[in-house]
Amino acid sequence: MGEFPERVQANMDVVLDQVCTELPNGGDHKSRRYVAEQLIEAARDGKITLGELSSAGRRAVVYLKNAPKSA
């Protein structure tokens, strides 16, 4: 993730940990990866503040909670 300044990377790490607490057991690897990918996409779009990244992370968690479960 060297494409972002240290402050942005730190914000992304904080948001990932915060929003994944809403998932069972803090989220499995696949869920955390999805959230991280959404945070990276948001940062690439210029959304780099803690608030903007938090919004993107929460949207990702809501999506995961509402996604149909595979059998």
Image: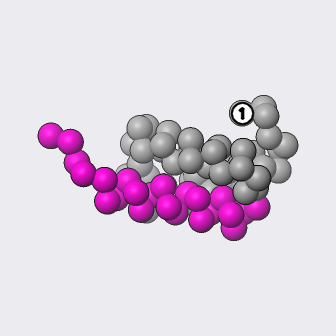
Please tell me which residue is depicted at 41% across the width and 48% down the height of the picture: 27
Residue 23, visible in the rendered structure: no
x, y percentage for residue 64?
38, 53
Left or right: 29 with respect to 53?
left
Please tell me which residue is depicted at 69% across the width and 67% down the height of the picture: 51
- Quarter-wise, where is residue 56 in the image? bottom right
Span of residues in magenta: 49-71
- Residue 55, relative to residue 70: is it above or below? below
x, y percentage for residue 7?
82, 50
* 48, 20: nearer the viewer: 48
- Tell me which secondary structure the magenta stretch mostly adopts: helix
- The crowding category of the residue bearing disc 1, from other C-alpha atoms within 10 Å (few below 14, some 14 to 19, many at least 20), is few
Q: Is mark 1 on a helix, strand or loop?
A: loop
- Quarter-wise, where is residue 36 in the image? top right
Quadrant showing the C terminus: top left
Residue 64 magenta: yes
Please tell me which residue is depicted at 48% across the width and 55% down the height of the picture: 60
Please tell me which residue is depicted at 71% across the width and 50% down the height of the picture: 45
- Quarter-wise, where is residue 30 in the image? top left
x, y percentage for residue 6?
83, 44
Q: What residue type is labelled 1?
A: Met
Residue 44, visible in the rendered structure: yes
> Mark 1 — residue?
1
